[in-house]
Amino acid sequence: MVISQEVSAALPSLRRYARALTGSQESGDAYVVAAIETLIKQPDLLEGAGDVRVELFRIFSKIWNSVPANQAADQRDALPIERRLSQIAAMPRQAFLLVSLEALTEEQAAYVLDVDVAELRSLIEECGREVADQIATNVLIIEDESLIAFDLQSLVESLGHTVQGVARTRTEAVNLAKKSKPGLVLADIKLADGSSGLDAVNDILNAFEVPVIFITAYPERFLTGTRPEPAFLITKPYQPATVSAVLSQALFFEQKAKRKADQAAG
């Protein structure tokens, strides 16, 4: 396979990681573009690469970590809550995302971040402690498969959140959302009556703003790299650690956005 084809194949997952790390597609893509431009200038960076996707993540991470504003330790003037949230945004959060969201092995993630496996594990544990400090919220689950819905409910509640309801159809989801005003939505794509979780989410977002995590067995339909895609996406079958990681990212950026809005209003 030609290297450029391998890079192209890796771009959707890199963009997903970049969005989760930065909080927006625009910001994430700016770093992805910087990584690709670096690769164009220095094509030898991929010479002898065993896994092009891992090498691409490594290039991206070196660029991301070279920007002082991305490092929590450099944000000395931030308010306490911003410092706490920013700690998740730095190295511990990267380690957590690489292993839990992108399914890299510990060895691969350690290589991407230029640390050893012991330090990587320490970073992941640190992120876990930060995630545990997140403010609990109310969650709406849109899922038509009973076993999966029960599993998600148990997992969400084990993380300290409250499940306000489980909807199996678009209509049920919209009605429950408008009634309970959840702080987070977990949504499957295909629902029981043939309706779409995407349509349900669009209806909900037309009523009020809420972070959404999509769950699908067909991620390639959304991670095309050529059009707007869900910022938070979990692939079925999922791992509990993946749900935990992505959920924490969604809440992280929701809290950060609210904090900025409050500061602007003040």
Image (cartoon, rainbow, N blue to C red):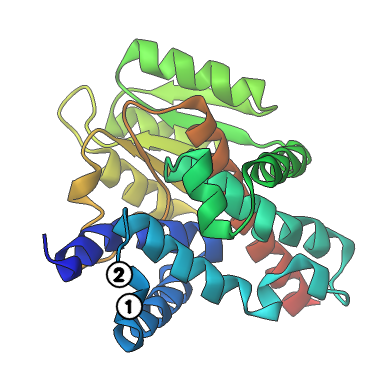
- The answer to whether residue 258 is left or right of residue 194 is right
Residue at 54% of width from left, 71% of height from top? Answer: 62
Query: Residue 30 or 252: which is nearer the viewer?
Result: 30
> Do the CB atoms of the residues marked 2 and 1 lie less than 8 Å apart?
yes
The x, y position of residue 6, in whole percent, is 20, 61
Residue 53's place in the image compared with 4, above or below, is above
**What secondary structure is marked by label 2?**
loop
The x, y position of residue 178, in whole percent, is 48, 40
The x, y position of residue 206, in whole percent, is 39, 56
Task: Give the farthest residue toward the left.
Answer: 1
Residue at 25% of width from left, 44% of height from top? Answer: 219
Query: Residue 128 or 213: which is nearer the viewer?
Result: 128
Task: Give the farthest residue toward the front.
Answer: 48
Residue 21's place in the image compared with 263, above or below, is above
Residue at 49% of width from left, 53% of height from top? Answer: 208
Residue 111's place in the image compared with 140, above or below, is below
* Label disc, if present, on residue 254 of the rendered structure: none
Residue 21 in which image quadrant: bottom right
Looking at the rendered structure, the kind of residue marked 2 is Glu
Residue 37 in which image quadrant: bottom left
* Image label count: 2
- The residue singled out by tag 2 in the image is 47
Residue 104's place in the image compared with 171, above or below, is below
The x, y position of residue 160, in whole percent, is 70, 27
Looking at the rendered structure, the kind of residue marked 1 is Asp
Query: Residue 177 or 80: which is nearer the viewer?
Result: 80
- The answer to whether residue 250 is seen in the rendering is no
Please rate how many residues cluster around mark 2, counting C-alpha atoms within 10 Å: few if below 14, some from 14 to 19, many from 20: few
**What secondary structure is marked by label 1?**
helix
- The residue singled out by tag 1 in the image is 44
